[in-house]
Image (spheres, coloured by chain):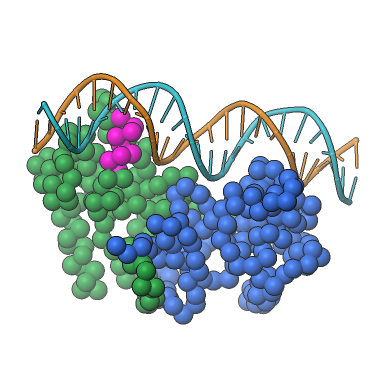
Chain colours: A green, B blue, C orange, D cyan
Amino acid sequence: MFDSERVNTMESMESNIKTKSQIVDLLVNHDVTPTQQRVKIAEVLLARHQHLSADQVLDDVNRERAVVSKATVYNTLGLFARKGLVREVIVDPSKVFYDSNTSDHHHIFNVDTGKLEDLHGGMLQIGSVPALSDQVETVGVDVVVRVRNKN
Amino acid sequence: MFDSERVNTMESMESNIKTKSQIVDLLVNHDVTPTQQRVKIAEVLLARHQHLSADQVLDDVNRERAVVSKATVYNTLGLFARKGLVREVIVDPSKVFYDSNTSDHHHIFNVDTGKLEDLHGGMLQIGSVPALSDQVETVGVDVVVRVRNKN
DNA sequence: ATTGGTGCAAAGGATTTGCAGTCTA
DNA sequence: TAGACTGCAAATCCTTTGCACCAAT
């Protein structure tokens, strides 16, 4: 419980990032050159905890006027994921979701609506992660509760 | 309860199914009309516990001579999944895996090799599945340990 | 005959790629 | 200026669809 509270506190800092200079710092801290397009994408995606597909990011970023191309959105999201700025969530075979919340948490996916939501802290716990072969190391553990609408 | 026990009993037999008539029975029990193509696909996929993509199934089924078309493979795998004969595993954004083991278990996915393996029983446990809204019901809980090769 | 199943090719949608032009450091 | 980054379009890859033909009841 205490752990999850602390994590939430840290997260709440990220989700409050608003100014361009804070975004720039964040990118630089994650070893990402803060180009005009990347900053714009980060402003949209990291503004709050959310799960967006590449296409949604593309739309949001270019809502007012065209700022970023499709190829750059894909490249940038992949880059952000590699650098740990966002988390890729693979639950829908038709597209990848990018989660602006990088702290440890799980997901609940509605197969009827295609909606992805967070499943917070104490709600579901992993007992123990198994020992792995010496050849490999764990990247992460993904837990997805798949639900559908009743009747 | 009785239903699920019966199903489990049948499933434990699945990995040993070899004869065509056993396959036919299995399909019929799962409310699937046993056509020539479906039986062939089931023979290949359900022969043992394995994780195959649609493309792999297509190749395996037509190894000797063309027996089933691509469209039918996709249709059939989707049908099998809906009927509970196989389990869809979504871990690789580029393709869906079909798991011939429908009993409760988790997965370990190597992002470098693209290989998917089972993670058996006691190795990793879910503490408690969270309460859901009245609107939805759980379809399943997927746990994936994502690993990569060292160095 | 009617219903369901199959095959082929075309369509669809997400993501990647090649390359020329542009920006950052 | 050199190396990175971006944009556009074309190309890929997986999966779905439309529709005519075949099969089983």
Picture coordinates of residue B88, whole percent (x, y): 55, 57
In the visual, does A13 lie left or right of B35? left
Q: Quadrant of residue B41?
A: bottom right
Q: Quadrant of the C terminus of chain B?
A: bottom left
In the visual, does A56 lie left or right of A26? right
Asked if residue B138 is positioned above or below residue A66 in the image, the reply reads: below
Asked if residue A56 is positioned above or below residue B67 in the image, the reply reads: above
The front one of A148 and A129 is A129
Majority SS type along the magenta span: helix
Res A54 seen here = yes
Q: Which residues are magenta?
A: A69-77
Asked if residue D4 is positioned above or below residue B54 in the image, the reply reads: above
Picture coordinates of residue A43, whole percent (x, y): 20, 41
Q: Is residue A27 magenta?
A: no
Residue beneath the point at 48% across and 44% down: A94
Q: Quadrant of residue A137?
A: bottom left
Residue beneath the point at 29% across and 34% down: A72
Q: Quadrant of residue B40?
A: bottom right
The front one of B30 and D13 is D13
In the visual, does A40 lie left or right of B74? left
The front one of B87 and A78 is A78
